[in-house]
Amino acid sequence: MSTERVLFAFVIVLALTLNVGFIAGDINDINHHNVYELFAALVVSLIATVMKFGDRSPLGSSMLATSLVADLQLIAAATAWGFYASGGAALTAHQGATVVSLSIGAAVANVVSVVLLIIEMANLRR
């Protein structure tokens, strides 16, 4: 067991679980979604991306691409939330749905990344 691989897998799975934790709830009710959880998902996703830059495995480039997509989606969600809330008003249902939808896109990218990680780990055993 490699400590580096364990940490690598931990961060990738943590990025996915934080993202799913944020999107869980009614898409039209922004009160079901925590801005700090979105922030945590973004930070962990960025850390996962940095860790993937050093990955020289055969699936490393695909994993990096999915992580970059997740980062882009989460940055867009955070930017949209910041833009909508800049006036001090609460987000409308439409604005909240936009933020959550962008985060769902990031979750899909993170799921693909975890699947690629599992495939890579299964191939290491052979």
Image (cartoon, helix red, strand yellow):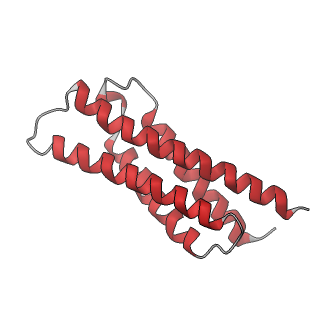
- Looking at this rendering, what residue extends furthest in the left direction? 87
Residue 22 percent coordinates (x, y): 43, 39
Residue 28 percent coordinates (x, y): 32, 23
14 up-or-down from 63: above or below: above
Residue displayed at 51% across by 65% down: 49
Which is more toward the observer, 61 or 12?
61
Residue displayed at 20% across by 32% down: 91
- Looking at this rendering, what residue extends furthest in the right direction? 126
Quarter the N terminus occupies: bottom right
Quarter the C terminus occupies: bottom right
The quadrant holding residue 117 is bottom right
Residue 82 percent coordinates (x, y): 21, 47
Q: On the picture, is 76 further left or further right than 43?
A: left
Q: On the picture, is 55 further left or further right than 71?
A: right
Residue displayed at 44% across by 35% down: 23
9 up-or-down from 17: above or below: below
**Residue 12 seen:** yes
**Residue 44 seen:** no
Which is more toward the observer, 66 or 25?
66
The quadrant holding residue 17 is top right
Residue displayed at 45% across by 62% down: 46
Residue 52 percent coordinates (x, y): 58, 68
